[in-house]
Image: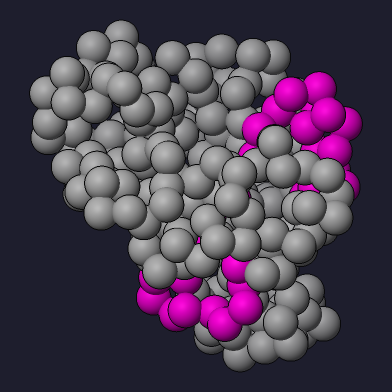
C-alpha cells in the first residue's frame, strides 16, 4: 500500500499550506503529496481546496474574485502563532523540489468541476514541463473534459480520474477520457477486486469538515488493500508510516 499526504499533513496542520507540505516531506516512506489548484482573478495558480476562501482563511468570497496580491493578504491560522498564507503552486514546487528529485510524487488536482477555470490545464502542464517534473507529477480532476485536455497537452502524463465510485472512474476510463489511474472515494469500492486489479486504484479520504475518523482511530489499511486499493490519500499519513 502506498501512502500519500492528502492536502499535505492536513490533520494536524492547515491543509494545502507550506507548513502541511513541509511536514509531509519529512515523512520517510511517503509516496507523494496531493494538493488542489485553482486560478485567481489574474490567472495565477494557487493551492486551495474550496472554491471560496471562507473555510480555511480569514477572508470571504471566491478564489476567482481575488487577484494574487489580494489573496496573499488572507491569513490561515496554523495555531502556532505564525500565520500561513495560500501558497502559489510555484512556491510549493520550490519547497519540495529536492524531495521530488529524490522520488517524491506530487498529485496535482485541478479543482475545476464547479468552476471550469479557462486555461488552467495549459498553465500547469507548461509549468511542470518547464521544471522537468513530468515524471513526478500525477494530474487529476473530477472533470472529464479537463482530463481529456491534459491528455492532449501531455500525452505521456500520468492522469487520475476522480469520482466517488470506482465503477464511475472505470466507466470514464473505458469511455476514453484519457486517464490511466482510478481515484475513487475510499468508501466507493463497488466492484469486485478482479475487475479493478489491473489498475492502480488510489483512494481518497476526506474528513476536513466532518471527520470520518478521529485522530485516535486506526484505519484498517490491510482491508483496503484486499479490496484492490493500491494507494491511499490520508490526512494523517505520519500516523501510518
Ligand atoms: O484527490 C483526492 C481528493 O483530494 C479528492 O477530493 O475533495 O479532497 O479534493 P477532495
Ligand atoms: Ca483534492
- In the displayed structure, would residue 16 be above or below residue 88? above
- In the displayed structure, would residue 33 be above or below residue 113? above
Q: In this view, does 91 lie to the left or right of 154?
A: right
Report how many numbered discs are placed on residues in the image.
0
In the rendered image, residue 162, in percent from the top left (x then y), is placed at: 36, 50
Report if residue 200 lies within the magenta region. no
In the rendered image, residue 195, in percent from the top left (x then y), is placed at: 17, 26
- Residue at image x 76%, y 62%? 126
Q: Can residue 119 be seen in this view?
A: yes
Q: Nearer the viewer, residue 172 or 67?
A: 172
Residue 38 placement: quadrant: bottom right
Q: Is residue 180 left or right of residue 37?
A: left
In the rendered image, residue 39, in percent from the top left (x then y), is placed at: 64, 76
Q: Is residue 11 visible?
A: no
In the rendered image, residue 114, in percent from the top left (x then y), is placed at: 39, 75
- In the displayed structure, would residue 60 be above or below residue 148? below
Quadrant location of the C terminus in the rendered image: top right
Residues drawn in magenta: 92-121
- Residue at image x 47%, y 66%? 146
Quadrant location of the N terminus in the rendered image: top left
Q: Which of 93 and 194 is in front in this view?
A: 194
- Residue at image x 63%, y 54%? 154
Q: Nearer the viewer, residue 115 or 124?
A: 124
Amino acid at each position: 500500500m502506498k501512502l500519500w499526504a492528502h492536502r499535505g499533513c492536513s490533520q494536524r496542520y492547515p491543509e494545502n499550506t507550506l507548513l502541511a507540505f513541509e511536514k509531509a516531506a519529512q515523512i520517510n516512506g511517503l509516496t507523494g503529496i496531493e494538493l488542489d489548484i485553482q486560478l485567481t482573478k489574474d490567472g495565477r495558480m494557487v493551492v486551495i481546496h474550496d472554491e471560496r476562501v471562507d473555510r480555511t482563511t480569514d477572508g470571504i468570497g471566491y478564489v476567482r474574485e481575488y487577484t494574487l496580491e489580494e489573496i496573499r493578504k488572507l491569513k490561515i491560522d496554523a495555531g502556532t502563532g505564525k500565520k500561513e498564507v495560500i501558497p502559489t503552486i510555484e512556491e510549493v514546487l520550490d519547497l519540495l523540489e529536492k524531495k521530488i528529485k529524490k522520488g517524491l510524487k506530487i498529485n496535482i488536482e485541478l479543482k475545476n468541476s464547479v468552476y471550469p477555470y479557462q486555461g488552467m490545464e495549459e498553465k500547469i502542464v507548461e509549468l511542470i514541463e518547464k521544471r522537468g517534473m513530468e515524471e513526478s507529477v500525477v494530474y487529476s480532476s473530477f472533470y472529464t473534459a479537463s482530463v481529456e485536455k491534459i491528455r492532449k497537452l501531455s500525452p505521456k502524463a500520468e492522469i487520475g480520474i476522480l469520482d466517488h465510485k470506482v465503477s464511475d472512474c472505470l466507466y470514464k476510463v473505458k469511455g476514453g477520457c484519457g486517464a490511466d489511474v482510478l481515484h475513487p472515494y475510499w468508501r466507493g469500492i463497488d466492484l469486485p477486486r478482479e475487475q479493478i486489479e489491473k489498475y492502480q486504484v488510489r483512494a481518497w479520504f476526506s474528513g476536513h469538515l466532518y471527520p470520518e475518523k478521529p485522530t485516535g482511530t486506526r484505519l484498517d489499511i490491510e482491508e483496503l488493500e484486499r479490496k484492490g486499493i493500491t494507494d491511499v490519500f490520508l490526512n494523517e499519513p505520519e500516523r501510518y508510516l
